[in-house]
Structures are given as C-alpha cells and as structure tokens.
Amino acid sequence: MRFIVMHKVDAAMEAGAPPNQDIVSNMGALVQGSLREGVFLNGAGLHRSARRVKVQAATGGAEPHAKPGPYQGENELVASFVMISARSLDAAVGHAETLASSLGGAEVEVGPVVEPWDLGMMTKPNAAPERFLLLCKSTAADEAGDTGAHHAAAARALSERLGDDGAVLAAESLAPSAKGSRLASAPKGQRLWVDGPFAESKELIAGFSLLQLPSKAEALAWADRYAAILGENEVDVRELNEP
C-alpha cells in the first residue's frame, strides 16, 4: 500500500524563520534510513504561503483568478497533487490554471519546492530547474467516491500540454479522507490520531512524504516518528490511489 504523510505549516515557517537545523538533520536521517528500507518513495517541502499562489479556474465564462499569498488556510483538504518543473512561478500558475480547468473548476495551490540549497546544504547549481507543487483541493465529488482516474487524466493532459515549457515530475491522487487519519493537538498538550472523514482542513500544507508500507498501522507508526521530529505540527496520513 502507498500513503502520503503531510505536515502543516507553523508560525515560524510563515514568519520566514530559517529552518531549524536539528529538524533538518533528524528528518534527513529518518528519510535516508527509510530509503534504505524501501519505505520512502518521494517527498518535498514547500516555501511559506507568501511565496505561493492559489488559482481558481474559469467557470461560467469568468476569467481564471489567481490569488497570491500570504494567506490563511481555507479549504486545504487535498485530492491530488502534481509536481512540475517550470521556468518561473508565473509559468507554473499558468499550468495550474490549465490543470484546474481540466478538473472542472477546482482550486489549485501553487507552491515553490524547497531545494537543498534553500536549506544551506549545497550551492545552487547554474541553471537549476525550478520545481513547483500543484495541490488540487478536494471537492464534494472527490470525498464522495473514487475520482482518482479523473485526476490522473488531468495530470496526463497537463503533461502533454507542457511541451518544452516544463515537465510533470510526479502525480498522485488521494483516496477520500474517510480512509485517512490526522494527528492533531489536543487539550493539555496531548497528541492523538483522529480518523477521517474530515469535513475540512484549515492548516496549509508545508510538505509531504510518500511511503510504501504493508498497512495503514505501519504508516501511522512512521508518521509518529516524523511528527516527533517536527514538534506540534498537524500531520495527515492519507491513502494513495493505485495507478
């Protein structure tokens, strides 16, 4: 089974504080160990919302609407994502408009991916490509049933339209949140897992990890280790649809 573990933003991140080096080091160790075990498949972090853009596709003859950050969380429940390379944020926003239209007017959030040079781990290579995560937000139809094929078709259509202007690097759709769980803060500083479905999510996504594990219980155990490194960030574990 494949799962996505998503952690949410915190105040320090939104304020533009430099990354906590203990978190970077400990998360790196967890990921490297999980890679060796064949558990970790992919992952990325996103820059704060001040560097993101939310796109609402054109509907009923209206023009597409792009809302630059910073912003507070609204509908942050994710139905699918597409990671792309693009020449600029403006180009990525244009591609997000195409994706949103293919999905029938869904909202798509465009987030620049945090690269190793952003964390001070290496020097930025010359002509390094820019990567962006397009987060497609859930609709009632996504939560009501299996719309994975629809999202996969939209990602394929985007890939075909990109041509030489970029590339689709990864694309996944999520099962309805009824199959998911959330690690949230509770009174007296406790933390507990809450099973879906979730009517909404108000917390912005800060990053994700894709895992291959035999069961959801093992995915939750991995996410517990992940959350312990991060601190108080809310964490969601969602099942991925199979290709």
Image (tube, grey):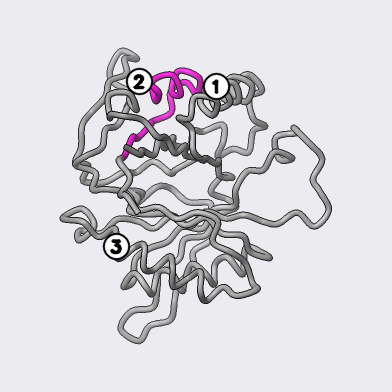
Question: How far, Cα to Cα, is label 2 from label 1?
Answer: 15 Å
State whether residue 207 is above or below residue 149.
Answer: above
Residue denoted by label 3:
149
State whether residue 125 is above or below residue 35.
Answer: below
| Circles 2 and 3: CB atoms closer than 8 Å | no
Residue denoted by label 1:
33
* Rendered location of residue 47, percent (x, y): 59, 45
Q: Please state if 13 lies on the left or on the right of 65 as rendered.
A: right
Q: Please state if 31 lies on the left or on the right of 123 as rendered.
A: left
Q: Residue at x 70, y 57 (%)?
A: 129
First-in-chain label (2 vs 1): 1
Magenta span of residues: 222-238
Residue denoted by label 2:
221
Of 86 and 157, nearer the camera is 157
- Dot 1: what SS? helix
Q: Please state if 166 lies on the left or on the right of 159 as rendered.
A: right
| Circles 2 and 1: CB atoms closer than 8 Å | no
